[in-house]
Amino acid sequence: MRRVLIIVCAFFAFLAAVASVLYAMYYFDLLPKKIYKAEDFGIETIKSDNDYDGDNIDDFTDVLYSARAYLKTKPKYKSAYYQGGYPPPNEGVCTDVIWQAFKGAGYSLKDMVDKDIAENTKLYPGVYGKPDKNIDFRRVRNLLVFFKRLAENLTLD
């Protein structure tokens, strides 16, 4: 009887060890997962005709992949003012995802926003009449004005 009890305990200890290893692998994202593509849902993938950075990846795909790559670094949320405008790689806020995505496609969102603010300061209430190249491109209210003016609004249908 004692031998049966030892075997049962060893079996459950083994199961607990396997479950612990599987949970750790799941937690650290080491287990393979099914990757869904737009086609799996009957959605047509739209490619850009542009490849601004010349890497043979269209700009739409570049922007998407660059945003994902930045998010995988799991930057710590820190809302701060940085000389030069850019935060360190391990820190960021929501708007940093956007400029990082553009950067991956070869665009400088900072330069584009700074130029538009300089040319149209009155349209940007968030700069209070005094543009600041170190922060303006990281402010949601400025990006909202910029994209409403210059980006195409796509339907969700």
Image (cartoon, rainbow, N blue to C red):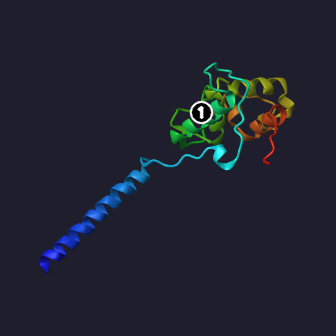
Res 104 quadrant in image: top right
Q: Where in the figure is residue 110, as x and y percent of width and height?
A: 69, 27
- Residue ID for mark 1: 66
Residue lying at 76% horizontally and 40% vertically, measured from the top left: 141
Q: Where in the figure is residue 24, as x and y percent of width and height?
A: 38, 54
Which quadrant of the figure contains the N terminus? bottom left
Q: Please give the count of numbered marks on the rendered protein.
A: 1
- Is 5 placed above or below 52 here? below
Residue lying at 62% horizontally and 32% vertically, measured from the top left: 100
- Is 56 placed above or below 151 here? above
Q: Which residue is nearer to you in this view: 108 or 43?
A: 43
Q: Where in the figure is residue 125, as x and y percent of width and height?
A: 82, 37
Q: Which residue is nearer to you in this view: 108 or 153?
A: 153
Residue lying at 26% horizontally and 63% vertically, measured from the top left: 14
Q: Please, what secondary structure does the residue beneath circle 1 have?
A: helix
The residue most toward the top is 54
Q: Mark 1, residues whose alpha carbon is within 10 Å: few (<14), some, or many (≥20)?
A: many
